[in-house]
């Protein structure tokens, strides 16, 4: 099913842009916290997100602090996935830990509000607006299993351990 993304953001978006430090310790509920994502970049951004939307960015998305609030707030906002040229390493792992899908690919061919369709099985991001298929870096099998379960904790609860993921 095609979805549009809400914002095309630049390179080096740090976790404090995702969710400002002034909220990280004051708000514990992720749904409530998600109402403040990207507030310092674009006020009211969170209100524009529709469930299943994509966020598209440049390189090094999620640099900065290692706290899980940033990917957890993005997931709670209703975003289906974050699509970027590259991700900061710890953000990448934290995102899959909380069940947020991250997709690495070339994003120069995506403009704001293009209709996109993601196919993780074929490793393709379809830009339906432009009629272009963009090859994506395959999501590792273990990470796909975590996504399918809703994150690493839910996976553990569901499977009683990690023996079958190795």
Image (cartoon, rainbow, N blue to C red):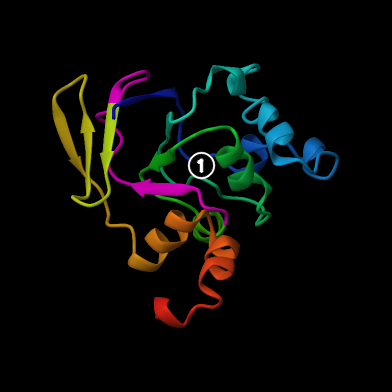
In the rendered structure, which segment of residues is drawn in magenta? 98-115
Tag 1: Cα neighbours inside 10 Å, few (<14), some, or many (≥20)? some
Which x, y percent locates residue 14? 59, 43
Instruction: Please report the residue visible at 27 percent of the width from the left and 49 percent of the height from the top.
Output: 120
Which x, y percent locates residue 3? 35, 26
Which quadrant would residue 28 be assigned to in this image?
top right
Which quadrant would residue 116 be assigned to in this image?
top left
Q: Nearer the viewer, residue 11 or 4?
A: 4
Instruction: Please report the residue visible at 67 percent of the width from the left and 25 percent of the height from the top.
Output: 39
Quadrant holding the C terminus: bottom left
Which x, y percent locates residue 152? 55, 64
Quadrant holding the N terminus: top left
State yes or no: residue 84 in magenta: no
Which x, y percent locates residue 18? 62, 37
Name the residue carrying label 1. 12
Against 157, is 10 above or below? Answer: above
Against 93, is 111 above or below? Answer: above
Taking the image as shown, residue 107 lies to the left or right of residue 47, namely left
Taking the image as shown, residue 63 lies to the left or right of residue 60, namely right
State yes or no: residue 113 in magenta: yes
């Amino acid at each position: 099913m095609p979805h549009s993304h809400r914002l095309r953001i630049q390179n080096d978006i740090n976790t404090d842009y995702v969710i400002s430090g002034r909220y990280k310790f004051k708000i514990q509920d992720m749904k409530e916290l998600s109402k403040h994502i990207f507030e310092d970049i674009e006020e009211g951004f969170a209100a524009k997100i529709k469930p299943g939307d994509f966020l598209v960015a440049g390189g090094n998305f999620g640099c900065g602090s290692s706290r899980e609030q940033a990917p957890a707030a993005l997931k709670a906002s209703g975003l289906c996935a974050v699509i970027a040229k590259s991700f900061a390493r710890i953000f990448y792992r934290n995102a899959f830990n909380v069940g947020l899908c991250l997709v690495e690919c070339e994003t120069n061919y995506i403009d704001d509000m293009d209709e996109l369709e993601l196919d993780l099985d074929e490793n393709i991001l379809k830009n339906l607006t432009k009629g272009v298929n963009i090859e994506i870096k395959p999501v590792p099998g273990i990470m796909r299993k975590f996504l399918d379960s809703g994150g690493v904790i839910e996976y553990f609860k569901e499977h009683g351990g990690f023996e079958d993921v190795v």
